[in-house]
Amino acid sequence: MKIIRNCTIVDGVGTASFRGDIVVDGDRIADVVRGGAPVCPGAEELDASGCLATPGFIDAHTHSDAYLVIEPDAPSKLTQGVTTEINGQCGGSVAPRYGEARLSSDWASLLGDRLTWRSMSEYREVLAAAKPAVNTVQFVGHNTLRSSVVGYAGRAATADEMRQMKRLLEQSLDEGGWGLTTGLIYQPGRYSTPQEVVELAKVAADRGGFYATHMRSEGDRILEAIDEVLDLVKATGIRAEISHLKTSGRNNWRKIDAVLDKMQSAVDSGLLLGSDRYPYCAAGTDLDVVLPDWAQEGAAKAECERLADPATRARIVDELDASGRDWSAVMIGGTWHPETKQFSGRVVSDLVRELSLTPGELVCRILEKDLCRTGGFFFGMSEENLDKIYRRPWIVPGSDASLRAPWGPLGADHPHPRAYATMPEFYRRVRALGFSREETVARMTSVPARRFGLRGRGVIEKGAFADIVVWREEEFVARSTYTAPHQFSGGVEFVMVNGSVPYRNGRFTGDRAGRFLEK
């Protein structure tokens, strides 16, 4: 038994905070005592004087599927109070993995001989052996399904391929998948028809699953993309979340009111559960998304072959240089080759001036060296719009990031600061908009727990799972930056996951009890 003493309890459901103690027995909260619990001989006492005790934070949109196997202490997540991640997002999941399906290049290269699974159930076995520190909800990615059956060809699926995808999705859901996600700007999901996605969403809906989508457009055609999501929900009855809500590109910033009004109407009518958003105005994804559409077909392997052909490469360079893209809004993220490491955290427009290259030449040179695995940060969003988005109470925090560590294989990358600091930044920004402490914590805990059907999580109450974070409000700050990302957030004293304490007083204890959650 453990007793968290002398804390200010914020229970996650909006109740006014109060002073008290939390009694934990095994993996559950045995009691919540206003004022103070009686002495219990033999219980472990955890002093939380001067701290808030809240439910563990739920990161509603993450990509840690593979990294939980590589770095199960989940350092960047625990140090910002995250106890549960919603993984398998944007159409890319760690399983199932058949046919031509390839994990993202960083996952595959870092996993090495630990990449032994094909099915969802096999992945679960590997994950259980790793003993992760945080809970994970695992979605099934449409891109992973499609590449397993259709491959990376730029065409519609045949009727037989649709049957195979449905069977593979059914199997993955039966083995613990939470639902279906899409990433409709990425390979190979971008080649799917709306009807293909609807047919797969029906399979997920029939098994009580959820749907989360990186829509077909977040810029020029964002309103039409939202309509595609709503049409899918109407056709399937599935519960749906729109991922990382934004209006990308300065020309689209003016659309934010229409976007929010359309989504508010859908939320009010029960068509949408809501949305998530990270508290930054730069997106983070692979740098190869800047390549012309035709040059992206077939994913990294085909891209590298095109870059190796002088005539094709020249065409790519010319199209990039003529694209009209604002290269001052593109920063190089994680790189892989020794010759490209120097470019991480640098803006493309600055680099081209220093190196006397065109943007197309620079991008192609970096991608070629990195085998098309380079990351990029894209500063295409509005701070004013982010505040408008965060004023909607159905927006919850989603980092859109894998877990990271400042050491080991994950420390060699150059991640977006959202990997380390989404929770303190979300808390700071939402509080600055006038939301109370209790309302803000609820959006980080019980709101996403209810949205995704996480029973017994996201609340501090008798009988709930003991996922608890104890933190100092005034010290809960982001330290990670775009140029120096590997820095833990401040203010978290200790974290409890299923009654165990994997992080305490700046130390990762190895007492890991995270779980693969099932509906």
Image (cartoon, rainbow, N blue to C red):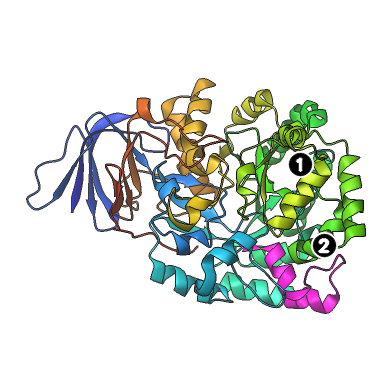
Determine whether the residue tagged by mark 2 lies in a helix, strand or loop. helix
Residue that label 1 marks: 218
Q: Is residue 71 left or right of residue 347?
A: left
List x then y, in percent, for residue 13.
42, 37
- Classify residue 258 by image quadrant: top right
Q: Amino acid type of disc 1?
A: Glu
320 and 38: which one is in front?
320
Tell me the amino acid under the disc marked 2.
Answer: Ala
Secondary structure beneath disc 1? loop
Task: Specify start and end residues of the magenta stretch as a single range.
Answer: 140-164
**Callout 2 crowding tier (Cα within 10 Å): few <14, some 14–19, many ≥20:** few
Task: Name the residue located 56 percent from the left edge and 46 percent from the top edge.
Answer: 414
Pick out the residue farthest to the left: 41
Residue 159, magenta (yes or no): yes
Q: Is residue 96 above or below residue 344?
A: below
Q: Which residue is mark 2?
A: 308
Whether residue 188 is visible here, answered yes or no, is no
Q: Is residue 9 left or right of residue 46?
A: right
Alpha-carbon neighbours of circle 1 within 10 Å: few (<14), some, or many (≥20)? many
Look at 88% across and 41% down and name the residue there: 321
Please state, as top left, top right, bottom left or bottom right, where the N terminus lies in the image.
bottom left
- Kindly report which numbered mark, 2 or 1, lies closer to the viewer in this rendering: 2
The answer to whether the residue labelled 2 contacts the one labelled 1, judged by CB atoms less than 8 Å apart, is: no
Q: Quadrant of residue 55?
A: top left
Tell me the distance, in whole angstroms, between the alpha carbons under discs 2 and 1: 32 Å
Residue 82 in view in this figure: yes
Answer with left or right where residue 149 lies relative to residue 480. Answer: right
Q: Left or right of 283: which side holds 186?
A: right
